[in-house]
């Protein structure tokens, strides 16, 4: 009982630190996740907390809700539009990164080949926890956010599977390439299937229910259940959670009432905030400074190898235009290279290394060094890079624009919901007319405010128009795919028309980043 109370007290202490950090970053220009890591480092020096990261804690408790929440909000149409570059970065990109990092470490006599391959695999996955938090905080463009978020969600599964293959090589000294490939496909496809089936099943259940408490519970069970079930069958739990979140997030909310959506999204935002906060605090607390100092030179070489490998992979795959149907603009490639942060997954894999791996202390030190560099240096500077490249949308548009735009979209959504209730005879005619009139008056007032704002800021009009034009072109592209599935358009014509639309979308996006 006393041990439990001590644990509870330390958890409350962490929550108090989280609260103080959250309040502090409102007044300083510092990413929240970075401030949490710094707070954790301070607590580690003081030795006031004894909580520490373990592989089970990271992968079993923190990662499922964080990945689920990110995947839940990712639109399939956006993911599908850039599926080729995302898939290339998530699979071949991780394999190439692993090889490049291992090559540098072997060439500099930092590690023998088996250990170098293990490190390359565990450090090659960009972490959605750090990436999503940083990019959302600076208002990155929608497509750039989709590219980075989509890659980071899917390359986790690739890195975990590859890590276990490389770990077997390090322990047994040999590996069958065919067996490794079969195992990779089995674990990956199995995870995708488990996540897809569970995500679809829960989405269909949500369609029949209109109780936010039940729906929040269902999604919570889905986030953890998909991970646990996939791991039980020795599949990729991370990929299962990604697909479960994607499927459920794109199907489930269709049948929800607006109030249920608000509650569900708010609860998941809080769960992600809580998991994110604990994870980064514990990251700072768990840093072993004596190990970092003892392996300082190898750690610095590892940082250079990881950063250089990231730039090579992104520019090599991103520049291979023949692989992609949509060109990735050069400014996006630079941000994707510098924004390839590392975090929870890499640490969990490093902490799970068995004692039989002779280089384990050095591998742990190198992993902490890379993670700290990406969070304390890259995450801090990414907002400045985005601003320098003209990719920080919040700095390009006045805050009043986003406020008025939000009001307009909310009013129009409420109006459509009211119309649906009226069509279903769920409202009295007089009630419908009264509320509809009030919404129309509010919409007219907000529209007038928007026109007035754009008149005061004519320099923003073209940018806003270009963003709308790009969305309209994407809607055209999606309509072509629907026509083809319905048999009203053949594949040859689809490819030709899509190529024209892709070029038009690319031209619009280039105008936004130049």
Image (cartoon, rainbow, N blue to C red):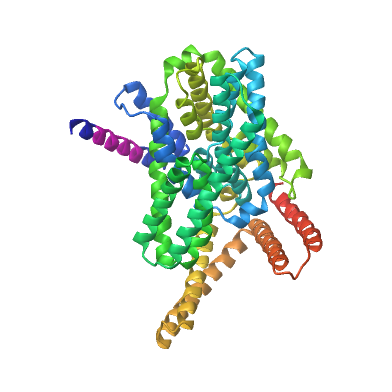
Extent of the magenta region: 7-20
Q: Is residue 479 visible?
A: yes
Quadrant position of the N terminus in the picture: top left
Magenta stretch prevailing secondary structure: helix
Q: Quadrant of residue 106?
A: top right
Please, which residue is most extreme toward the left here?
A: 1
Residue at (76, 40) in percent of width and height:
320
Residue at (55, 52) in percent of width and height:
74
Residue at (30, 27) in percent of width and height:
49
Residue at (38, 27) in percent of width and height:
285
* Horizontal arrangement in the rendering, residue 208 relative to residue 514 (left or right): left
Please, which residue is most extreme toward the bottom here?
A: 429
| Residue 510 on the magenta span | no
Q: Position of residue 394 (x, y in %)?
A: 56, 50
Q: Position of residue 355 (x, y in %)?
A: 45, 18
Q: Quadrant of residue 214?
A: bottom left
| Residue 18 on the magenta span | yes
């Amino acid at each position: 009982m006393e041990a439990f109370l001590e644990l509870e007290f330390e958890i409350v202490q962490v929550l108090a630190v989280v609260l103080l950090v959250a309040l502090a970053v409102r007044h300083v220009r510092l990413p929240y996740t970075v401030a949490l890591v710094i707070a954790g480092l301070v607590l580690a020096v003081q030795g006031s907390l004894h909580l520490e990261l373990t592989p089970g804690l990271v992968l079993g408790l923190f990662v499922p809700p964080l990945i689920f929440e990110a995947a839940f909000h990712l639109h399939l149409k956006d993911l599908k539009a850039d599926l080729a570059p995302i898939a290339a970065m998530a699979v071949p990109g991780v394999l190439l990164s692993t090889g490049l990092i291992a090559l540098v470490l072997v060439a500099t006599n930092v590690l023998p080949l088996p250990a170098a391959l293990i490190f390359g695999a565990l450090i090659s996955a960009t972490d959605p926890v750090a990436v999503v938090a940083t990019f959302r905080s600076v208002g990155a463009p929608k497509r750039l956010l989709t590219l980075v978020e989509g890659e980071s969600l899917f390359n986790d599964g690739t890195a975990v599977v590859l890590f276990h293959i490389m770990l077997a090589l390090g322990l047994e000294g040999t590996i069958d390439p065919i067996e490794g490939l079969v195992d990779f496909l089995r674990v990956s496809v199995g995870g995708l299937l488990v996540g897809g089936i569970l995500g679809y099943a829960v989405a269909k259940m949500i369609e029949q229910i209109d109780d936010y408490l039940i729906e929040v519970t269902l999604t919570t069970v889905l986030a953890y259940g998909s991970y646990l079930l996939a791991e039980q069958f020795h599949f990729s739990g991370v990929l299962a959670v990604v697909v479960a979140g994607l499927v459920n997030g794109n199907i489930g909310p269709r049948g929800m009432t607006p109030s249920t959506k608000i509650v569900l999204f708010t609860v998941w935002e809080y769960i992600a905030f809580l998991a994110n906060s604990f994870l980064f605090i514990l990251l700072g607390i768990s840093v072993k400074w004596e190990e970092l100092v003892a392996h300082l030179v190898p750690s610095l070489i590892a940082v250079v190898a990881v950063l250089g490998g990231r730039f090579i992979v992104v520019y090599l795959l991103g520049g291979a235009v023949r692989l992609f149907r949509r060109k990735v603009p050069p400014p996006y490639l630079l941000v994707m290279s510098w924004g390839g942060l590392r975090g929870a997954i890499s640490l969990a894999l490093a902490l799970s290394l068995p004692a039989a791996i002779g280089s384990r202390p050095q591998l742990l030190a190198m992993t902490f060094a890379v993670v700290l560099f990406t969070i304390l240096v890259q995450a801090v500077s990414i907002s400045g890079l985005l601003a320098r490249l003209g990719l920080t949308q919040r700095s390009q548009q006045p805050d009043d624009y986003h406020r008025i735009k939000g009001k307009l979209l909310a009013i129009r959504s409420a109006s459509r919901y009211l119309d649906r209730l009226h069509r279903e005879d769920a409202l009295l005619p007089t009630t419908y007319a009264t509320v509809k009139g009030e919404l129309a008056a509010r919409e007219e007032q907000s529209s007038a405010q928007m026109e007035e704002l754009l008149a005061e800021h004519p320099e923003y009009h073209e940018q806003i128009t270009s963003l709308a034009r790009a969305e309209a072109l994407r809607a055209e592209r999606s309509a072509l795919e629907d026509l083809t599935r319905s048999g009203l358009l053949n594949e040859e014509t689809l490819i030709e028309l899509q190529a024209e639309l892709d070029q038009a979308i690319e031209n619009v996006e280039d105008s936004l980043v130049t």
